[in-house]
Amino acid sequence: MKQNESKTSKKKDRLNNLIIMKKITLLFIGIVVSVSLFAQGAKTTIDSRASGYYTPEQLSKMSETKIRQVNWLYNNSFEIPTEFSGQIDPSDIDVRKFSKFRAVNEKVKVSLGKDLYEESTDNGMFIYLLSIHEMKEAYNQIEEAVALEQKEQYLTNDENKPAGFPSSEDRKSKKEKEEFEKEQEEYYNTNK
């Protein structure tokens, strides 16, 4: 009997580990896709569930980083248990309504209840909200990714440079010249 329980427990652990790995992979793919779209110059749009919380003026002034963080909040800051994966549509969840229940360092189980799927009673369905700490980590990763993208875009895009700023070709030439001068100096110092 204990052996069967042990096998069942091990299977559940493996399944949970696979689910976690799948979610991490999906998060990574989401960030990579976001990075790719931004690098191609595409303007990221805010998730439609979030747009109702902002005025058009706020949306127009929102930074790329903030938009991606809000989109991550609505798409990745919660987990749907596997037993509800076919029943709960992630796009139906307005996670902002549940965010007040987030804990600092641990996931929190939150009932979806009658508000989302049924009129009269609690339906037993729930999600897990990621912790505030996990959210901050993800927000920092998004901020770093956007900053890196913007830096790369700035260094490779000559169209947006202010007048008198050296083009990427000029910078290459300057770098080559500096390297050549450094080589000459090293040669000179070794052959005195």
Image: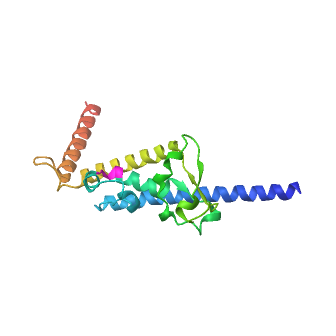
Residue 158's image quarter?
bottom left
Q: How many labels does the image show?
A: 0
What residue sits 49% from the left and 64% below the top? 92
Residue 127, given in percent of the width and then of the height, sits at 58, 56
Q: In the displayed image of the protein, which residue is found farthest to the right?
A: 1
Q: Residue at x 27, y 54 (%)?
A: 153
Q: Which colour scheme is used?
A: rainbow
- Taking the magenta stretch, the answer to whether it contains residue 85 is no
158 sits to left or right of 126:
left
- Residue 6 position, x and y percent, is 81, 55
Q: Position of residue 52 (x, y in %)?
A: 36, 58
Question: Which residue is at the front of the view, 159 or 60?
Answer: 60
Q: Which residue is at 29% across, 33% downward? A: 190
| Residue 31 position within the rendered picture, expressed as x and y whole percent measured from the top left | 43, 56
Give whichever of 4, 113 is nearer the camera. Answer: 113
Residue 126 quadrant: bottom right
Report the residue that reaches farthest toward the front.
120
Q: Which of 4 and 108 is in front in this view?
A: 108
Identify whether 81 is placed above or below 180. Answer: below
Query: Magenta includes 63?
Result: yes
Compared across the picture, whether 176 is left or right of 146 comes to left
In the picture, which quadrant includes the N terminus?
A: bottom right
Please identify the residue farthest to the left as the structure is shown. Answer: 163
Magenta span covers which residues? 62-66
Can you name the residue that lies furthest to the bottom here? 86
Q: Is 184 placed left or right of 73 in the picture?
A: left
Query: Nearest the camera: 95 or 119?
Result: 119
Residue at screen point 30% across, 62% down: 40
Answer above or below: position of 85 versus 74: below
Q: In which quarter of the image is the C terminus?
A: top left
Q: Could you tell me what secondary structure mostly forms the magenta stretch? A: helix
